[in-house]
Each structure stands twice: as structure tokens, then as C-alpha cells.
Image (tube, helix red, strand yellow):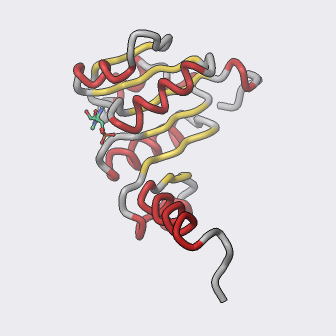
Amino acid sequence: MMNNRNKNDEYIVIVGCGRLGSHLARLLSKARKSVVVIDKNEGAFHRLGDDFSGFTIEADAIEIDSLLQAKINKADVVVTTTNDDNTNILIAQIAKIIYKVPKVIARLFEPSRQQVYEELGIETLCPTILSAIELKNIIVGDKMEV
Ligand code: AMP
């Protein structure tokens, strides 16, 4: 479902409130975005800190009910950041295909699977590849080798 919300009013659902999801949620909260974070482990929400202005839902995000509780059908952006590639891709596909969320990004640990998911229209973010590129730039600079 495309909507006419402008960038400032974007509604963002983050799945997983671990090391990556909580950090992202805090950054977006500081940027005054509307954020909802889902995690199956209540203790994970402590990572958000006291100044987090968004909402939290303690639930297994694989359950459609928890996604509906997070109003995934109204989301402009869904980011899946659990520690399981299959969970992230499944929820990303649900968001994209069933709920037509305009922007969906999945955390992906396994670099070799990235191309397949990109071909399915799921944007992925692979910390392993990003870290390797950044480390290479730190070590030898960002010029292409000949
Ligand atoms: P981290 O690897 O530190 O980024 O943590 C990943 C987070 O994802 C943890 O807080 C897990 O509790 C959470 N998580 C894993 N699977 C699910 C799931 N199916 N639904 C909701 N949260 C999950």
C-alpha cells in the first residue's frame, strides 16, 4: 500500500531489538521518527534506554498477530534485524508481498544468499560484507587495485 506520508511522518517497524535493532531504533527515535520494535525477549528492550520515544511489542514476530499488532499494514518501512536469516527473510517477504510495505530491508548474515534475495526484490543489508569493505578501506584505502 503506497501512501502519501512525507519522510518526516514515516512509520517504521523494526523486528528484533538486539545489538543491531536496538541501535537502529535509538538512532531513529533521536531523529524523531515513529518507531515500533518487536522482540520475543522482553529483556531486549532495556537496550533502548530511557529516552526511547517509540513503542515496543514483546512477541514472536513470526506470528502474523504480532505483525498486525505492530500495524505492519500501515508501515512505510520494515527492517528485520533478528539473529536468524530465515526469520528475517520470511518476515521481509510477508511485509513486502502481503502488506505491500514500500521499503523493506532484511539483515542477512550469509553473504552468499544476498543475490538470491535481491532477485526476489528483498533489499538486504549484510554486515559481514559491509565490515569487510570498511576494513579493506581502512587498510589499503578505497581505490580499486589494478
Ligand atoms: P542481535 O543478534 O544481538 O542483534 O539480537 C537479535 C534479536 O532478535 C534478539 O533480541 C532476539 O530476541 C530477537 N529475535 C530473534 N528471533 C525473533 C523472533 N522470531 N521474533 C522477535 N524477535 C526475535
Relative vertical location of residue 78 with respect to residue 45 in this rendering, above or below: below
Q: Nearer the viewer, residue 121 or 129?
A: 129
Ligand 1: which quarter?
top left
Number of callouts in the render? 0
Q: Is residue 119 above or below residue 26?
A: below
What residue is at 47 percent from the left and 65 percent from the top? Answer: 132
Q: Is residue 52 left or right of residue 33?
A: left
Instruction: Establish if 98 lies above or below 117.
Output: above
**Most distant residue in the front direction:** 139
Could you tell me residue 144's position as x and y percent?
66, 78
Q: Quadrant of the C terminus?
A: bottom right
Residue 83 image point, x, y percent? 30, 45
Report which quarter residue 59 is drawn in: top left
Residue sitting at x 27%, y 29%? 60
Q: What residue is at 65 percent from the left and 23 percent from the top? A: 10
What's the residue at 46%, 20% (across, down)?
A: 36
In the rendered image, the quadrant that contains the N terminus is top right
Q: Position of residue 96 (x, y in %)?
A: 54, 42
Q: Nearer the viewer, residue 11 or 66?
A: 11
Residue 88, position as x, y percentages in the image? 38, 45
Q: Quadrant of residue 12?
A: top right
